[in-house]
């Protein structure tokens, strides 16, 4: 009996092991993605005490660049990994499916944000809350604003990264297919589009509010494509890996220079600069070269640091990797938590203690969202196997 | 020199303005080309307030130079819901649109373009980022920055707010762009709110030490609310302005702009 029972148990253990393995081990990309997610959550609560500890205070780029860079990195891992055997048709389907998922996530969180503001304005008898995050058009011009919300031409403040991500994922089959069939053309094409956007100030318009996208997809695709290329073992990624030490030495002064610029509020004056000025100022919307370089330098300096961090702080490394593995769910949770934090600070004032509560509550809830998402996956796996067992 | 002197100088202007209203109305059509106005256009009766409550003007040399040399000037109106025009019946009733009409009416033959870049609910730190991008592309002669209300509401620390505003003003000066700061919304709800008060103080101090014009919106609105209680300046939500409220806002800003650009005896500080 025992002899026969053992393999059965062993098989169960194996199943459990496999199902655990489905959740990737903590790794560098997930860790930094988790780090970027936590940073974005804090940065999106204006005035919060802990904002001063986020790295944008010592750099001229911030977690938005890091997040998009890592999204490009993850796309490459998908294209070279699970999606490698797919034909062009299925690859397009798969990537557009992902774009659609991100789009749905954006619609859901935007609608929840609107409801959060509406509910808070009723509860606190504070009509001005309906203005926050650029939401007022939803209430004053609902006919056009609701169309704009669905078309992504109307974006709530701080809810403007996912629209960029949707645009990038919509274009991702072009990137993947160019990589498969015309690899040398990918970087020049991306650079050309970026340079075109900066030279002529080309950006997507917003509607019904007058203005343009906070993150210009035509400019920001470059950092996404660079993430995609640097994730590979060959080409640009291979080159970077072979010369990692030199890159580190090159990047370190840039990172330090960025820290000095950020600390001294240095920002070049367009009047003293030649045309096209967007190449020389530190512009976020158009991802000016200085911000792009800052991001790449930070990546070069900290690439490889994960091993040491995971060794010294295994729990934190594990937790941030958990967040990063479930980045879409955690991003959505984080966006709504940031808004809730803003409302909390309005209602109860902002001091270090309540800010510490907001940050701890937020990070734990983001962790819970990630855990719930993985638990659901495990449950699904278990249930799909149940009838066969 | 402090606020007092600027206030006195502006007081005289306002005292004269009412009397000059008729003369101005007659004289204006006679002006042949973009002659600089010697006085600010008169205020509508509903919008009248003591000059000291309206603005602390400062000179606007780049805006004046643009009008003198090109007969045209570009103004960038940036800020939050009061700039985008929440509560107005149409875009044409927002303060930047009304301001454009007032300035062109006051300076016959001049072409003034006021671009509206208001994003509702925005705090100054985010606007500051947009300012850099807009300036690099649009190259305005003058920037009207309406700010403070949302920073007070989301509890941005006053010193952090001060750093943002001060460094942005200095950056704008380096770029030869005149700045007019447009202050906080008045609401009886926040008349005793410490944070609101602190942010107002910071704005006043920054405008004074950086020598930039400051439209004292809170004071003017409070004066009108207390002295013209029969006039409805607010939209239905009782927080945003309605068309008349935006008209007064535009008239008050126009006053600070014209005084700052053309007044012969410019106050040496504010």
Image (cartoon, coloured by chain):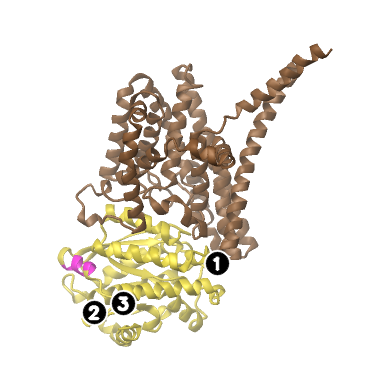
**Residue A186 picture quarter:** top left
Q: Are marks 2 and 3 in contact (CB under 8 Å)?
A: yes
Q: Specify the colour of chain A.
A: brown
**Are marks 2 and 3 in one subunit?**
yes
Disc 2 and disc 3: Cα gap in Å? 10 Å
Q: Is residue B238 magenta?
A: no
Residue A93 screen position, x and y as percent: 49, 24
- Camera-nearest label, 1 or 2: 2
Q: Which residue is mark 1?
A: B236
Residue B1 vs A83, above or below: the answer is: below
- Camera-nearest label, 1 or 3: 3
Q: Over which residues does the magenta segment extend?
A: B62-68
Q: Which residue is mark 3?
A: B57
Task: Compare marks 2 and 3 and give the one earlier in the sequence.
Answer: 3
Residue A121 screen position, x and y as percent: 60, 61
Q: Chain of mark 2?
A: B
Residue A38 screen position, x and y as percent: 53, 46
Residue A203 screen position, x and y as percent: 34, 44
Disc 1 and disc 3: Cα gap in Å? 32 Å
């Amino acid at each position: 009996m025992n002899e026969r029972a053992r393999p059965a148990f062993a098989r169960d253990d194996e199943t459990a092991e496999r199902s655990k393995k489905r959740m990737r081990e903590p790794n560098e990309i997930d860790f930094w993605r988790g780090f970027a997610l936590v940073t974005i959550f804090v940065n999106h609560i204006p005035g919060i005490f802990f904002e001063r500890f986020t790295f944008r205070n010592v750099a001229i780029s911030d977690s938005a660049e890091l997040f998009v860079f890592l999204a490009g990195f993850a796309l490459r891992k998908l294209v070279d990994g699970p999606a490698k055997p797919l034909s062009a048709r299925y690859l397009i389907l798969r990537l557009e499916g992902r774009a659609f998922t991100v789009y749905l996530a954006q619609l859901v969180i935007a609608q929840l944000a609107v409801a959060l503001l509406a509910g808070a304005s009723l509860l606190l008898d504070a009509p001005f809350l309906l203005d926050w995050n650029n939401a007022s058009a939803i209430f004053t011009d609902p006919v056009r604003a609701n169309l704009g919300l669905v078309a992504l031409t109307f974006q709530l403040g701080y809810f403007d990264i996912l629209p960029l991500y949707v645009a990038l994922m919509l274009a991702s089959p072009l990137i993947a297919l160019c990589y498969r069939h015309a690899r040398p053309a990918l970087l020049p094409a991306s650079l050309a589009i970026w340079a075109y956007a900066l030279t002529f100030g080309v950006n997507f318009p917003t509607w019904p509010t007058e203005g343009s996208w906070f993150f210009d997809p035509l400019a920001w695709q470059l950092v996404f494509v660079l993430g995609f290329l640097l994730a590979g073992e060959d080409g640009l990624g291979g080159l970077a890996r072979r010369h990692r030490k030199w890159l580190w030495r090159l990047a370190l002064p840039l990172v330090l220079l960025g820290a000095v610029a950020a600390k001294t509020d240095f920002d070049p004056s367009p009047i003293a600069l030649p045309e096209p000025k967007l190449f020389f100022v530190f512009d976020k919307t158009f991802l000016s070269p200085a911000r792009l370089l800052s991001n790449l330098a930070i990546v070069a300096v900290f690439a490889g640091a994960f091993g040491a961090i995971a060794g010294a702080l295994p729990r934190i490394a594990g937790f941030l990797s958990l967040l990063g593995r479930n980045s879409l769910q955690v991003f959505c949770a984080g966006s709504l938590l940031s808004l809730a934090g803003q409302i909390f600070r309005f209602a109860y004032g902002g001091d270090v203690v309540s800010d510490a509560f907001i940050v701890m509550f937020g990070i734990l809830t983001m962790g819970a969202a990630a855990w719930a998402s993985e638990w659901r996956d495990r449950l699904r796996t278990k249930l799909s196997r149940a009838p066969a067992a | 020199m402090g606020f007092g002197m600027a206030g006195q100088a502006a007081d005289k202007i306002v005292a004269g303005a009412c009397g000059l209203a008729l003369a101005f109305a007659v004289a204006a059509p006679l002006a042949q080309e973009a002659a600089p106005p010697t006085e600010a256009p008169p205020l509508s009766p509903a919008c009248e307030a003591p000059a000291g409550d309206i603005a602390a003007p400062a000179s606007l040399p780049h805006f004046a130079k643009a009008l003198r040399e090109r007969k045209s000037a570009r103004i960038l109106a940036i800020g939050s819901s009061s700039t985008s025009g929440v509560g107005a019946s149409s875009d044409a009733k927002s303060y930047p649109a009304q301001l454009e009409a007032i300035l062109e009416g006051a300076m016959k033959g001049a072409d003034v373009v006021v671009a509206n870049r208001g994003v509702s609910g925005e705090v100054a730190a985010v606007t500051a980022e947009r300012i850099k991008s807009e300036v690099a592309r649009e190259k305005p002669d003058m920037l009207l920055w309406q700010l403070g209300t949302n920073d007070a509401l989301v509890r941005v620390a006053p010193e952090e707010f001060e750093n943002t505003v001060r460094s942005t003003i200095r950056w704008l000066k380096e770029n030869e762009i005149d700045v007019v700061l447009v202050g906080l919304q008045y609401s009886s709800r926040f008349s005793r709110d410490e944070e609101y008060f602190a942010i107002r103080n910071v704005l006043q101090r920054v405008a004074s030490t950086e020598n930039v014009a400051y439209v004292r919106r809170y004071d003017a609105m409070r004066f009108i609310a207390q002295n013209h209680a029969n006039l409805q300046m607010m939209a239905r939500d009782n927080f945003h302005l309605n068309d008349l409220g935006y008209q007064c806002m535009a008239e008050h800003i126009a006053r600070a702009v014209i005084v700052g650009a053309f007044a012969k005896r410019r106050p040496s500080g504010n």
